Image (tube, rainbow, N blue to C red):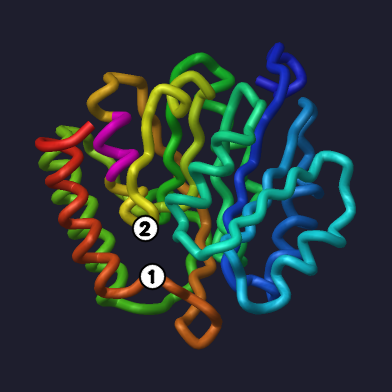
């Protein structure tokens, strides 16, 4: 089914950024190059970057760009809250500001929602035959362990809970309150969409992970926080 056959008003692409001056322009250009035949907006959130990210954002061309600025660094979850609040689309898609995820894969991420099968779609780095950069073994094992523990608590069978690529029907994300400011967003949103009973799909995606020297930010303390959030938002908090 072609995107143009679906009567949707708009797709909102949320891009949180913190110190991403090296990649932000390339990512936005890649997003703008995707052939999506419905109206779309790109919402950029600068989470109080200390490099030239804000200056780059201010000068990026595009009539569909929406810019949001944080005066204090708050974290990915907080940046996404700001992005969701600014979004006007019927479908909301999360895109990281680095080069790990390829916007050319938007059509297959959107398709289960456009077909009327899904309310939420996760792009999994661990299923399918798409290209993957070979990097950290223990990082991959940590992701798989957190996904397993999340699945045990939510009774879902996801393969990649920690993925960046998450797509939501607008009414789903609007009815969820996001409380986590940092990377705890991933297990929190997963627990909450599971509780909502909405239809969740996964599609395989490619992945070009970056090293810590190249700017990767998530670390061991975020893994421990994710474990805490898996338990907290499944059993103790809304």
Residue 63 position within the rendered picture, expressed as x and y whole percent measured from the top left: 88, 41
In the figure, is residue 15 to the left or right of 121? right
x and y, in percent, of residue 21 in the image: 69, 74
Q: Residue at x 46, y 56 (%)?
A: 76
How packed mark 1 is, by other alpha carbons closer than 10 Å (few <14, some 14-19, many 20 or more), is: few
Quadrant for the C terminus, please: top left
- Across and down, in percent, residue 96 comes to 56, 57
Mark 2: which secondary structure? Answer: loop
**Residues under labels 2 and 1: Cα distance?**
8 Å
Q: Which residue is depicted at the point 48% across and 66% down?
A: 132
How many numbered markers are drawn?
Answer: 2
Q: Residue at x 19, y 65 (%)?
A: 224
Q: Secondary structure at mark 1?
A: loop
Instruction: State left or right for residue 143 relative to residue 201.
Output: left
Give whichever of 178, 210 is nearer the camera.
178
Residue at the location (44% across, 73% down)?
217
Residue located farthest toward the front when viewing the structure as drawn: 71
Mark 2, Cα crowd under 10 Å, few <14 / some 14-19 / many 20+, is many
**Quadrant in which the N terminus appears:** top right
Q: Main secondary structure of the magenta part?
A: helix
- Seen in the image, is 177 located left or right of residue 26? left
Q: Which residue is mark 1?
A: 218
Is 181 placed above or below 217 here? above
Q: Which mark is residue 82?
A: none
Please name the residue that numbered disc 2 is placed on: 183
Marks 2/1 in contact by CB < 8 Å: the verdict is yes
The magenta segment is: 188-193
């Amino acid at each position: 089914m072609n995107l143009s056959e679906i009567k949707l008003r708009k797709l909102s692409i949320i891009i949180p950024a913190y110190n991403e001056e090296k990649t932000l322009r390339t990512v936005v250009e890649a997003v703008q190059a995707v052939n999506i035949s419905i109206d779309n907006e790109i919402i950029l959130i600068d989470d109080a970057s200390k490099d030239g990210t804000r200056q780059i954002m201010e000068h990026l061309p595009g009539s569909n760009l929406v810019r949001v600025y944080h005066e204090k660094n708050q974290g990915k979850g907080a940046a996404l809250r700001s992005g969701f609040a600014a979004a006007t689309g019927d479908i909301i898609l999360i895109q990281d500001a680095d080069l790990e995820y390829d916007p050319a894969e938007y059509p297959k991420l959107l398709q289960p929602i456009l077909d009327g099968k899904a309310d939420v779609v996760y792009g999994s780095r661990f299923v399918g035959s798409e290209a993957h950069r070979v990097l950290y073994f223990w990082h991959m094992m940590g992701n798989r362990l957190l996904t397993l523990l999340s699945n045990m608590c939510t009774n879902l069978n996801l393969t990649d809970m920690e993925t960046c690529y998450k797509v939501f029907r607008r009414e789903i994300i609007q009815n969820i309150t996001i409380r986590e400011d940092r990377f705890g967003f991933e297990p929190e949103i997963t627990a909450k969409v599971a509780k909502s009973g909405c239809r969740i799909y996964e599609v395989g995606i490619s992945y070009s992970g970056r090293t810590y020297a190249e700017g990767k930010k998530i670390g061991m303390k975020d893994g421990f926080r994710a474990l805490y959030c898996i338990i907290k938002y499944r059993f103790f908090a809304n």
